[in-house]
Image (tube, rainbow, N blue to C red):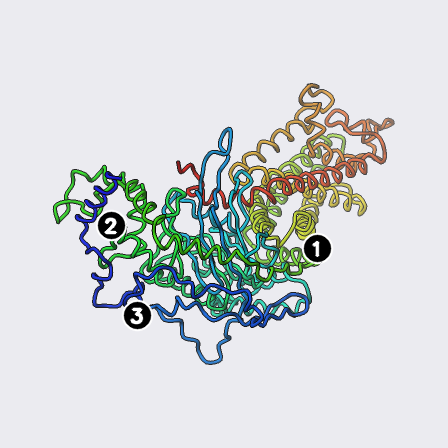
Amino acid sequence: MEEIQSQSDNYRSSSSSASSPASRVPSSNFFYLRKPGSLRQPISFEDSPEWDDTTDLDVRVEEGGDSINAATTPASPSLSKLNSGSLPSPHLPEGAVIPRKIAGASVAWKDLTVTIKGKRKYSDKVIKSSTGYALPGTLTVIMGPAKSGKSTLLRAIAGRLHPSARMYGEVFVNGAKSQMPYGSYGYVDRETTLIGSLTVREFLYYSALLQLPGFFCQKKSVVEDAIHAMSLGEHANKLIGGHCYMKGLPSGERRLVSIARELVMRPRILFLDEPLYHLDSVSALLMMVTLRRLASTGCTLIITIYQSSTEVFGLFDRICLLSNGNTLFFGETLACLQHFSNAGFPCPIMQSPSDHFLRAINTDFDRIIAMCKNWQDDNGDFSSVNMDTAVAIRTLEATYKSSADAASVETMVLKLTEKEGPALKSKGKASNATRVAVLTWRSLLVVSREWKYYWLHLILYMLLTLCIGTAFSGLGHSLSSVGGRVAAIFVFVSFCSLLSIARVPALMKEIKIYACEESNQHSSTFVFLVAQLLSSIPFLFLISITSSLVFYFLVGLEDQFSLLMYFVLNFFVTLLLNEGIMLVVATLWQEVFWSVLTLLCVHVVMMLSAGYFRIRSTLPGPIWMYPMSYIAFHTYSIQGLLENEYLGTSFAVGEVRSISGFQALQGAYNISPDANAKWKNLLVLFLMAIGYRILVFILLFLFVGKKISLLKSFKCSNRDTTDTS
């Protein structure tokens, strides 16, 4: 303690600020200033909810559970303490829609500890005995530097921890220890996937259809409420933008769309993981003003923020300051300034409180101190960075544990949990049939607009088949043309299968959208796969029939309608099977580069074992004959097409002798003499297509739906979940 005190005194004496923030107030009004005397007051209990008074609440749930109308408790008195210089609420023009009131819910967590599984045991503590609360109609912020545990604490409160993490402690919602049911809360990750080819209104409308039961017409009012709540009226009919569009919505508006998707359910609690991530100062301020207005409707907001400007800081109600998993402060935002001042770290004049907090508790500044210890600034030394951060953290933690603020938090949590309030009720879900229909229609709409992934793909297929058809045109129907026809069919099947790999980015995007929607229970694995299959059938059939017609007539295959229809059907099932393989690989890798590389290797191996470069019966048995030639779908597709072309035909040899098509083909490719062989090969292709879809279902259900969707957010905030010891 002597070392801590000495270094704390040194930092206090070397600081360019005075001993108290109140004595160093500039003449102009800052956004974080309140009425005189309020800075030194401990946390107030005036806004603590009383469950006995809940009879005053007018909560009415409309039929179908699509919307909730509620008159909430008055705004928190702590908000009225903001100085007149604070950022005012945005002016509502005449005729503007007033946001619908929401019955919020209180959230309290007590002695919350989260550990991450190491190599042998759960030993890495990411969150250490955190205690706090969030009240309806307020904005609670979890702030801290990198690797402080912000996102982990947010996921722990929301019940969305990664499977490799364990949580100790208690979380209370309206005074009861229970998990939040479907529709009662919303969670927005730091990075979410949107559909760029849809407009904002279309995207939210389809989200409403996926989430809510009832008729389609009932969802329009819900969508309009979400659009107005997030101030997206000017962008409602604009495309969100994405890979195929040169210009889309700015990053701030895209983040608002992600939040609006969760507001469709009108949740009582909303969790936001770094909503200001990658936003400039203006976009960040607009975002926080929008969230501040959303909180004023009664919703309980809990968000994480790495850093904020002075204006944004003035919009917070309460702040939970973390460093290395330790809670250095929890309470009203301005009380945090007093806490730092009491600990010997007063905020310098004209400096953002957020910058000052992070400067004092961010251990990365120790490296800057080491680099700059021999340098000098205009004042002679780096007076603001001359103290060990670890000492500052220990000082702030010790000061907080013995302060009236910590005692007030304990008392408030006890008051919130001593009596159970109204339980949160689960809202109705859309049926699986409705979700399949909505996802199918949405995917078809996306296909019609995504020129880069679909229409350009179709054009490339046409160009490829045109090249192959012209290269093998004029073969004739003589015995000498057998080898050329076998080569043409092999090249057609193999190269078209290789070209389909170009759809991997589109499939990867669909999987990411599914993972995002499934994590919030907007979809399911079965619904996604059925809708994906139904929406891909028209596109694949369009490719198969156009490519087959061009190739069939340019090469000059047998001129019979039944044979042509079999050719189209065989190629269509081949494309369907190939898409199943791509889904399997994309699900396993979750990255475009490795998925494309793996698929190229798989197709090359299948081409080698398809029986063209070397007749199938002469392939080496241990590897190529068994099992490679039986796994390769090229084998069954090419066999079926050759049997469709040559079985039942004959070729004249001389003037008196003729041989069957099967005999003529024996020297170039192995096929079966059975008249029904081509249908058997088609059945094998169809069963393989079903088998790969079942494998995709298992992989999505076991890994993506349950783990990888959470692992995505876990990796995005890996800086918060690394070892903090």
Q: Disc 2 marks which residue? A: 344
What number is the disc on residue 85? 3
List x then y, in percent, for residue 231: 47, 68
| Contact, mark 2 vs mark 1 (Cβ under 8 Å) | no
Q: Earlier in the sequence, mark 2 or mark 1?
A: 2
Q: Disc 1 marks which residue? A: 432
List x then y, in percent, for residue 575: 67, 43
Local packing at callout 3 (Cα closer than 10 Å; few below 14, some 14-19, many 20+) is some
Q: Secondary structure at mark 1?
A: helix
Alpha carbons under labels 2 and 3: distance apart = 27 Å
Query: Which residue is found at the position 63% from the left and 58% from the top?
Result: 442
Q: Quadrant of the C terminus?
A: top left
Relative side of 440 to 677, left or right: left
Query: Which residue is found at the position 72% from the left and 27% from the top?
Result: 668
Relative side of 319 to 422, left or right: left
Alpha carbons under labels 3 and 1: distance apart = 52 Å
Residue with the most extreme right position: 656
Local packing at callout 1 (Cα closer than 10 Å; few below 14, some 14-19, many 20+) is some
Alpha carbons under labels 2 and 1: distance apart = 59 Å
User: As rendered, which of 18 and 653 lies closer to the eye?
Assistant: 18
Relative side of 496 to 79, left or right: right
Q: Secondary structure at mark 2?
A: loop
Q: Earlier in the sequence, mark 3 or mark 1?
A: 3
Q: Quadrant of the N terminus?
A: top left
Q: Label 2 amino acid?
A: Gly
User: As rendered, which of 657 and 320 lies closer to the eye?
Assistant: 320
List x then y, in percent, for residue 486: 70, 33
Q: Label 3 amino acid?
A: Gly
On screen, residue 134 above or below 524: below
List x then y, in percent, for residue 554: 68, 44
Query: Which residue is found at the position 51% from the left and 31% from the top?
Result: 121
